[in-house]
Amino acid sequence: MEIKDFDFDLPEELIAQTPLKDRTSSRLLVMNRANETIEHRHFRDIIDYLNPGDCLVLNDTKVLPARLYGSKKDTGAKIEILLLHQQEDDVWEVLVKPAKKIKSGTEIVFGHGQLHCVCLEEKKHGGRMVKFAYEGIFMEVLTELGEMPLPPYIKEQLSDQSRYQTVYAREQGSAAAPTAGLHFTTDLLDQVKAKGIEVAFVTLHVGLGTFRPVSVDTIEEHDMHSEFYHLSKENAQKISAVKKAGGRVIAVGTTSTRTLETIATEHNGEIVPASDWTSIFIYPSYEFKAIDGLITNFHLPKSTLVMLVSALAGRDFILRAYQAAIDERYRFFSFGDAMLIL
């Protein structure tokens, strides 16, 4: 398949720059795969489409305040660093701007000297391995000095940093939010549970590869980024029990989907406790083994995420739904509206 098969024209003014005041007031486009119909609702109506005995699976990763601004120790040149993932102790893989200024051995200072790092290794595409030095607890220093790493298409400042976290975020480690979950409130999740719907959690730490454009013409040649995931015994048992009882597994977000599909692929369709790295790339004609439905936001043209939803709902149906969303002036991407695929 060719990358151009997943392209569409998106007016720039439909890219949401700020979150809505009420998380559940986002719009919801509902796609029914059985009869290829589309409905326009609001996210608070999601409960109408979930049945007792279903299982909602959410990604409880928490976004790190991973963007740091510092200066070179020797010249004072301004440097921006974005944490990608921790390798060991205080060694991290990071992205650096401007990368050409940072060579092996370069020292960078942040804040008033509360945090230092030294470059250990140069990698491709602006990547570096660095080792941090500080006093106290790293996460406390990072919370003091770091900023939330909003996606490159969001130009507005985020006044409330918590709006780029889900209300159930608890496992620190992401460079970006699992944005399908941003629409949920604690009250809405309580309503879900009260209706007899199981709520289970996976953890997948979202990497910046999620925003990396596909740079090949033929999608099968794309090299998918790798991300760490974890599924506990308790949550694996919840999801398995629902599947065995004939209930539906509804993934909240492409990250939850990729986690469950990775585990099912590697364990003969079974959902079992697991922790590992996944680079699963889901595109048409992938056969889903774990999920029965998906809640997701609207994704970038020609992105791997558009390919994933096309694998679930069919490329033509997805492109028709996206065009309907554009015609109805839905808000797109991280702070935008949602779709439900059943």
Image (spheres, rainbow, N blue to C red):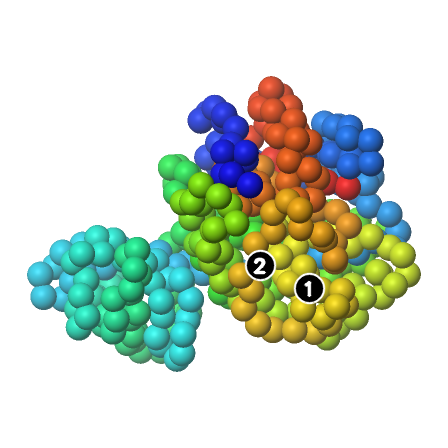
Give the SS element for disc 2. loop
Question: With respect to residue 18, does 254 lie above or below?
Answer: below
Which quadrant holds residue 89?
A: bottom left
Q: Is residue 232 visible?
A: no
Image coords of residue 318 (percent x, y): 65, 33
- Check disc 2 and report the residue beneath it: 280
Q: Camera-side residue: 296 or 36?
A: 36
Q: Residues within 10 Å of mark 1 (few under 14, many from 20)?
A: some
At label 2, counting other C-alpha atoms closer than 10 Å, the crowd grade (few under 14, some 14-19, many 20 or more) is some
Is 337 rendered above or below residue 304? above
Residue 126 in the image, given as x and y percentages of width and height = 28, 57
The residue where tag 1 is placed is: 265
Q: What residue type is labelled 1?
A: Thr
Mark 2 vs 1: CB contact within 8 A: yes
Residue found at the far top of this picture? 327
Residue 274 falls in which quadrant of the image? Answer: bottom right
- Residue type of the residue flagged with mark 2: Ile
Is any atom of residue 157 visible in this view? yes
Which residue occupies 55% across, 41% down? 1
Q: Residue at x 49, y 34 (%)?
A: 4
- Name which residue lies at 31% across and 78% down: 135
Local SS, label 1: helix
Q: Residue furthest left?
A: 75
Q: Where is residue 41 in the image (x, y as percent from the top left)?
A: 73, 30
Front residue (pair 253, 314): 314
Rendered residue at 19%/70% (across/down): 104
Determine the CA span between mark 2 and mark 1. Answer: 10 Å
Coordinates of residue 30 in the picture (x, y in percent)? 73, 34
